[in-house]
């Protein structure tokens, strides 16, 4: 069923872009009703407008909290175009509204700008949300425009279709209206429930971006989020599901080093196979790559440093999926962009998320993101042998690497370079052997290195293996009822051990 727009209610908080809508409505001879600042804008354009207070007989009251909440407004929106309803509109002198253009007070924006509760509460929209819901409910007869994002579509109806809309279009607008209103309500609920013990989970994300496929070609996948808010997409092909998961792991790891000296990390299947900190991006790249040049092939590369042309030349010599950096020199970007399929991302920031979600069984689990990073003040020396200042730096570096590798994991570090790692093992002993074997396989001497474990040692077997490999210091969370067995072994063999008191499992 086609509906021609004859009467419109227009009342918005943000007037940006509204003038083009008003002009198009005026050219079609649409009668407009409005409130406050929106009515002032229309009058300022020398276009006639009926003020809502003249329709209702009531001014805007209670500091603007009540403007449109009146039967003469909602009756004109909710009325069916049937004899009974139409006769009541005539009886009470209520106009039929065929179009409702509104937006909502900027509640989420206000949350970002202030912690003052009074200001936040005032940005909970009542009239606007009610108008949106009413118009969406009566979409059989009414077009609802709930956001500036929908102005372009409305303009095409006004200009190309001369103000006539189809039922299919109005249903799509109604769906969009409920998307806007449900997201708004979710944000308000989240604000009020932030101190609740077990709040209900309300997740509202922007429209999804289809991905070519999921982890495997037979799996459908969609990304819900705004990549442009975190990254500037410089060049390359479309990101895949696996790319996105790896990028998330890469950014989470590099967040730990964002204030450090130049650091490079190489990620493969969400695990770091190379991490190093040096005095330049180029040297950090070489040190990270040396840890496992085989796994680095086709990996995700990330650095906290500016990628200059010399570093770009070296990185570009190896096939990779994605390169991420905070900055690139113009010469480096020109070189890197020559290979059209390789993805180059400029990182704007490291993200704001504080919770993670995962679907399991017939539901979901939510947890705080592991943002805990231990410093020297968090270390408890539990052995007679004290770690040297250099060992402490390496131990803290190794602890960060272990935090971002799949459990069970063991990490070996020497001079701020991860030289070996074992991860995703069902046995911590296997992870220990894997880390040592891998280091030696790529030409590293394990003697003099330090070792990190993501969880405690229930037996002294791992520290014995470490000692036999020449490892001199160990960092682990502690917490086993048999902690002393590992401590005693270290004391007997002049090894240093520190405990953090914090476990970093990653499943």
Image (tube, grey):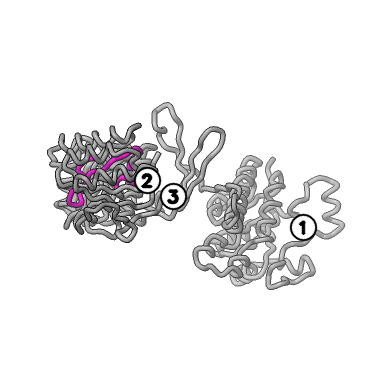
Q: Are marks 2 and 1 in contact (CB under 8 Å)?
A: no
Q: Residue at x 60, y 72 (%)?
A: 44
CA–CA distance between discs 2 and 1? 53 Å
Pointer 2 or 1: first along the chain: 1
462 vs 312: above or below: above
Q: Quadrant of the N terminus?
A: top right
Span shown in magenta: 401-420
Q: Is any atom of residue 244 visible in this view? A: no
Foreground tag (2 vs 3): 3
CA–CA distance between discs 2 and 3? 12 Å
View extreme (top): residue: 218
Which residue is identified by label 1? 95
402 vs 473, left or right, is right
Q: Quadrant of the C terminus?
A: top left
Foreground tag (2 vs 1): 2
Foreground tag (1 vs 3): 3
Q: Regarding mark 1 in the picture, which secondary structure is present there?
A: loop
Q: Is any atom of residue 133 visible in this view? A: yes
* Front-lying residue, 488 or 427: 488
30 vs 74, left or right, is left
Where does the image place residue 33, in percent across and percent down from the top left?
69, 63
Q: Which residue is drawn at 74% across and 69% down?
A: 53
Q: Residue at x 41, y 50 (%)?
A: 370
Which residue is identified by label 2? 248
């Amino acid at each position: 069923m086609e509906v021609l727009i004859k009467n419109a209610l227009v009342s918005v908080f943000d007037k940006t872009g509204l003038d083009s809508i008003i002009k198009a409505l005026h050219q079609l001879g649409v009668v407009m009703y409005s409130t406050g600042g929106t009515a002032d804008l229309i009058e300022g354009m020398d276009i006639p407008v009926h003020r809502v207070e003249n329709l209702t007989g009531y001014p805007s009251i209670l500091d603007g909290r009540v403007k449109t909440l009146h039967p003469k407004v909602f009756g004109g929106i909710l009325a069916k175009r049937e004899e009974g309803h139409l006769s009541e509109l005539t009886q009470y002198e209520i106009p039929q509204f065929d179009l409702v253009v509104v937006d909502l007070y900027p509640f989420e924006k206000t949350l970002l700008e202030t912690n003052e509760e009074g200001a936040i509460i005032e940005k909970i929209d009542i009239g606007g949300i009610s108008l949106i819901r009413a118009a969406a409910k009566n979409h059989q007869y009414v077009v609802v425009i709930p956001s500036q994002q929908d102005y372009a579509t409305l303009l095409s109806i006004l200009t190309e279709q001369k103000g006539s809309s189809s039922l299919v279009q109005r249903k799509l607008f109604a769906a969009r209206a409920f998307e806007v209103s449900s997201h708004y309500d979710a944000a308000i609920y989240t604000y009020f429930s932030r101190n609740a013990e077990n709040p209900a989970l309300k997740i509202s994300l922007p429209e999804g971006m289809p991905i070519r496929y999921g982890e495997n070609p037979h799996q459908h996948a969609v990304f819900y989020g705004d990549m442009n808010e975190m990254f500037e997409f410089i060049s390359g092909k479309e990101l895949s599901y696996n790319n996105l998961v790896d990028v998330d792991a890469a950014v989470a790891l590099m967040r730990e080093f964002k204030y450090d000296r130049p650091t490079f990390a190489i990620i493969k299947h969400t695990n770091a196979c190379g991490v190093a900190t040096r005095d330049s991006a180029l040297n950090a790249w070489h040190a990270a790559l040396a840890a496992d040049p085989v796994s680095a092939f086709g990996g995700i590369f990330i650095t906290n440093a500016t990628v200059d042309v010399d570093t770009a030349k070296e990185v570009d010599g190896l096939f990779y999926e994605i390169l991420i950096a905070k900055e690139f020199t113009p010469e480096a970007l020109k070189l890197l962009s020559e290979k059209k399929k390789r993805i180059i991302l400029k990182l704007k920031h490291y993200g704001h998320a504080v919770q993670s979600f995962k679907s399991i069984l017939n539901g979901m689990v939510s947890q705080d993101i592991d943002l805990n990073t231990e410093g020297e003040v968090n270390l408890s020396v539990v052995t007679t042998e004290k770690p040297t200042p250099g060992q402490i730096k390496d131990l803290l570096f190794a602890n960060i690497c272990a935090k971002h590798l799949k459990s069970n994991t063991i990490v070996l570090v020497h001079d701020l370079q991860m030289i070996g790692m074992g991860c995703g093992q069902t046995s911590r002993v296997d992870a220990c052997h894997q880390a040592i074997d891998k280091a030696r396989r790529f030409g590293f001497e394990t003697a003099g290195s330090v070792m990190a474990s993501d969880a405690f040692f229930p037996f002294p077997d791992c520290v014995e293996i470490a000692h036999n490999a020449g490892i001199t210091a160990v960092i682990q969370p502690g917490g086993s009822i048999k902690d002393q067995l590992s401590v005693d072994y270290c004391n007997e063999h002049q090894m240093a051990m520190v405990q953090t008191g914090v476990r970093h499992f990653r499943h």
